[in-house]
Image (spheres, rainbow, N blue to C red):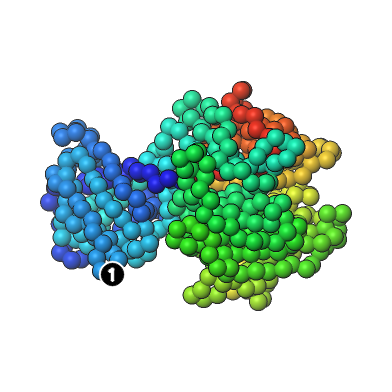
Amino acid sequence: MNRQVWILGIIAAGLLAGCSTTKNKKITLTVRNHETGEPMADVRVGQYRLSGAFPAPGSRNPSFPSMTQIATAQTDKAGTVAFRGVLRENAFDVHVNARSPIRFDLNGDNVVYDRPPAPLPKNRETTLVIHYRGRDLCVNASQGYLDEQTAYIGTYTGDSGSKGIYRIRVNRPKGTVSKPELVAEIPNPSFLAFDRDREYLYAVSESSKKVFAYAGVNGDGMLTLLNEAETGAGPCHVVCHHTNLLAVADYGGGSIGAWILEGDGRIGGQAAFFQNTHASKATGRQQQPHAHGVTFSPSGNRLLVPDLGADRVYVYEQYAASSGYKPNETAPWIELPPGRGPRHVAFPQWTQSEQRDLYVLNELSNTISVFKYDYDAHQKAFTFVEEVSTLPEGFEGQSTAAELIVREKTVYATNRGHDSIARFQRDPETGRLTLLDCTPCGGKGPRHLSLMPGGLWMLVANQQSNNIALFSIGGNGALTLVPDGGVDIGAPVCVVFE
């Protein structure tokens, strides 16, 4: 969470080749994945000092020609960052304002981002390969990752022996996990979330009815507490959106709160508060409302709240040009069949299509409900597709679902009781799921799971067996437990990578 140097290599092929250009002509900038050729919506230069190394002079790789001079960046009066000049031989240093449009002036041409794209995850090494093709500038992006990644663990304290939030480090090449270090002593920090730039950490404390804001680890090895805000009873889930909003779901009180995040990471004024009142009464745990999750839509114009006690996913709309939210007037919730007990919802990776998919994890029925999401719709934005079980056919024991991860072609969900991780194949076109297997979770009570940036490793928080299990991820998303690769810790219930 301390500001770190990101590595950015920018190679301009054709810059020295005298390509045809028109001075002051606006050039379209397209960012594509270098392997698939698909446009990428998640490439942003960010607000950090970026530096990188290029091939030595005389490199024979035609995609990485030598550079000749230096490019610098300054912020003008309008807050726009302009790159002027040309690149030098083997280095590129620049400061960029993350919230400003980015204008490139290269060889007399002008390239404009009308708005900043979504941020790249922190601790990621990035290479951008730039090619001039007539009057268009095409950027191919590939990403690498640091050898060691930091993760933070939320725990249930008390009888488990845990005291709050812990930090671990995962070694990417070796597949090892360091011993947990206590970095914040608070009661029952059951869920954690980073802000959009992964500079500040937010934690809900179920027993104290508060959400806490933290900055980086200070000299004594502990997180720096910035401030705190009051929540409803039993806060159980917290999330941040890139529009600088923080939202919290209160399981015990059945309420939802949202706050504006200040520039220094502090929790600011409350932007919304909603009190759910409906209960489905289909099961013993559904006699009153239990808001169990908060998820922003990819654009941030909707806030979705699965309520386990109501068998509903509530839909809140953002006010135009404000940070406030209100219930959707025509379709204020998604109604689920009785006894489902929705716990969390998730969207897949951002796609270029006009429609996206929404996945609802139902804790009590051990199922995933799939919906098509039309983000432009003002009335019925969610259309039911299917419901699939997270358990293998023939299982008749007690189990509840706890967490899910939705990737482009793979979906994971945890089963507590069956003590497994269900793996689904996802059809990117239809959104439909096919259960492939259920892998033992490496412990008991898998409450949460998290993917290491880059997708090579998965951490699973096994609450009942007091351990974090480590899995390697195969090319098809298959999970393999790493023997003795995890770590023991009392009642882990959430794990997030920095």
Above or below: residue 318 compared with residue 464:
below
As drawn, the residue found furthest toward the top would be 483
At 33% from the left and 56% from the top, the residue drawn is: 30
At 14% from the left and 46% from the top, the residue drawn is: 69
Above or below: residue 109 compared with residue 16:
below
Q: Report x, y in % for residue 273.
A: 65, 69
Q: Report x, y in % for residue 343.
A: 71, 53
Relative horizontal placement of residue 97, taking residue 356 as reference (left or right): left
Which residue is labeled 1 in the image? 78
As drawn, the residue found furthest toward the front would be 220
Relative horizontal placement of residue 191, taking residue 145 as reference (left or right): right
At 48% from the left and 62% from the top, the residue drawn is: 262
Quadrant hosting residue 478: top right
> For this rendering, which residue is in front, 136 or 414?
414
Residue at disc 1, secondary structure: loop
Q: How would you rate the neighbour count of disc 1 (Cα within 10 Å): few for under 14, some for 14-19, many for 20 or more?
A: few
Q: Report x, y in % for residue 487.
A: 61, 29
Count of marks placed on residues: 1
Q: Is there any visible trace of residue 145 in the rendered image?
A: yes
At 52% from the left and 45% from the top, the residue drawn is: 223
Residue type at mark 1?
Ala
Q: Is there any visible trace of residue 126 in the rendered image?
A: no
Q: Report x, y in % for residue 428.
A: 55, 50
Quadrant hosting residue 415: top right
Relative horizontal placement of residue 305, taking residue 356 as reference (left or right): right
